[in-house]
Amino acid sequence: MKKQHVNLTEADKNFLADFLSKGSQKVRVQKRALGLQMLDSGKTIVEVHQTLGMSYPAVHNWGKKYKAEGLKFLQDKSRSGRPVEFDGEDRAKVTALACSEPPEGYARWSLRLLADRIVTLEILPDISYSEVGRILKKTNCSLIEKNNGVSEN
């Protein structure tokens, strides 16, 4: 007799059967549920990974995760992503400074000059000139002077 990698409860078997009959879930979630059913029916990890086209370690982890978390592991966990570095208020302050008069001795703001002034005025603790450029690009702000639609060359 083959080793049974997962022992599903009757309630879990019924839930998975109902869950898979609907067919409106993400493919990743359906594969996890189907793999769990296959592991419960006595299929080996190798057979399941070949049948579903998933990696061996992924299928192996499904059994471990089921034992630890139950059926909660089927759903994808939320991913945090990169935290927002500058919020809307910070971006507005950068844009407002870019729209203000340039310092004495300068015809217009440069990205480096803006970045230095933002840190000097303690608007933000630290910001690079390239980040200033990204912020202004999103607001369609241009630091180049326009002379009636004709640019100077």
Image (tube, rainbow, N blue to C red):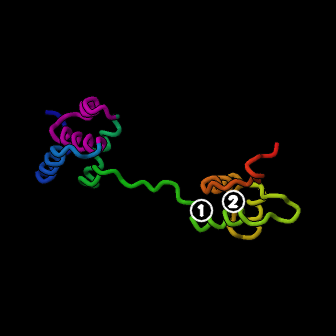
Q: Is residue 77 above or below residue 49?
A: below
In the picture, measured across the screen, residue 152 lies left or right of residue 25, that is: right
On the image, the x and y values in percent for residue 104 come to 86, 65
Q: Residue at x 82, y 42 (%)?
A: 153
Query: What kind of residue is marked 1?
Result: Phe
Report the magenta residues as a range.
27-54
Q: Which residue is drawn at 75% across and 52% down?
A: 148
Q: Residue at x 61, y 57 (%)?
A: 139
Q: Is residue 133 above or below residue 5?
A: below
Q: Could one spot residue 11 in this view of the protein? A: yes
On the image, the x and y values in percent for residue 38 come to 19, 38
Query: What kind of residue is marked 2?
Result: Ile
Secondary element at tag 2: loop
On the image, the x and y values in percent for residue 102 come to 80, 63
On whether residue 50 falls in the magenta region, the answer is: yes
Image mark count? 2
Q: Residue furthest front?
A: 148
In the picture, measured across the screen, residue 122 lies left or right of residue 5, that is: right
On the image, the x and y values in percent for residue 79 come to 42, 54
Disc 1 crowd rating (10 Å Cα; few below 14, some 14-19, many 20+) is: few
On whether residue 17 falls in the magenta region, the answer is: no
In the picture, measured across the screen, residue 150 lies left or right of residue 73, that is: right
> Between 51 and 145, which is closer to the camera in this rendering?
145
Task: Say the numbered circle drawn on residue 127.
Answer: 2
Measured in 3D between alpha carbons, the distance from the residue under mark 2 to the one under mark 1, in whole angstroms, is: 9 Å
Q: In this view, does 49 lie above or below 110?
A: above
Q: Quadrant of the N terminus?
A: top left
Residue under circle 1? Answer: 86
Q: Which residue is drawn at 78% across and 66% down?
A: 101
The mark that comes first in sequence, 2 or 1, is 1
The answer to whether mark 2 and mark 1 are in CB contact below 8 A is: yes
